[in-house]
Image (cartoon, helix red, strand yellow):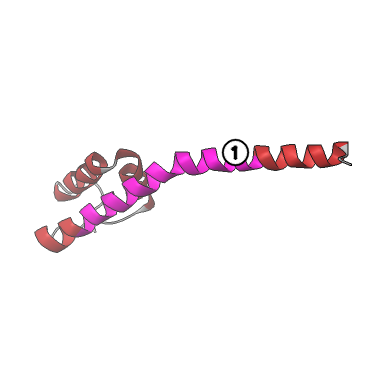
């Protein structure tokens, strides 16, 4: 026989799983943007010889902005405004 406590626990687990799924769907594009942006930053360092400091602020800009964010960080570093290593 199914009790009220068992139904409550199943409902709580379902809410937890749906919440975790929503969080993963929200964070996944940021992780992909961060990886692509870091690859662009390291390619700029290796191919163009630029010296870009990878700081937490630069990572946030790259993660939120993706490729345009990486270009912005590279541009600011090349002009020696910010992120100069």
Rendered residue at 39%/48% (across/down): 31
Q: Is residue 30 magenta?
A: yes
Circle 1: element type: helix
**Chief SS of the magenta region:** helix
Quadrant where the C terminus is found in the figure: bottom left
Name the residue at 87% across, 36% down.
4
- From the image, which quarter does the N terminus lie in? top right
Measured as percent of width and height from the top left, residue 53 is found at 27, 56
Instruction: State whether residue 2 appears in this view.
Output: yes
Left or right: 61 with respect to 11?
left
Q: Would you say 50 lies left or right of 32 here?
A: left
In the rendered image, residue 71, in percent from the top left (x then y), is placed at 19, 44
Q: Position of residue 40 (x, y in %)?
A: 21, 53
Left or right side of 79 for 38? right
Viewer-nearest residue: 56 or 3? 3
Region in magenta = 16-42
Residue at the farthest bottom position? 46
Mark 1 highlights which residue? 19
As drawn, the residue found furthest toward the front would be: 1
């Amino acid at each position: 026989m199914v009790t009220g406590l068992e139904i409550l626990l199943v409902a709580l687990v379902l809410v937890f799983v749906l919440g975790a799924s929503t969080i993963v769907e929200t964070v996944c594009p940021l992780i992909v943007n961060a990886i692509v942006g870091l690859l662009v930053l390291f390619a700029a360092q290796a191919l163009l010889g630029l010296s870009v400091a990878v700081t937490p602020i630069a990572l946030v800009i790259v993660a939120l902005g993706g490729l345009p964010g990486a270009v912005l960080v590279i541009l600011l570093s090349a002009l020696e405004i910010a992120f100069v290593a």
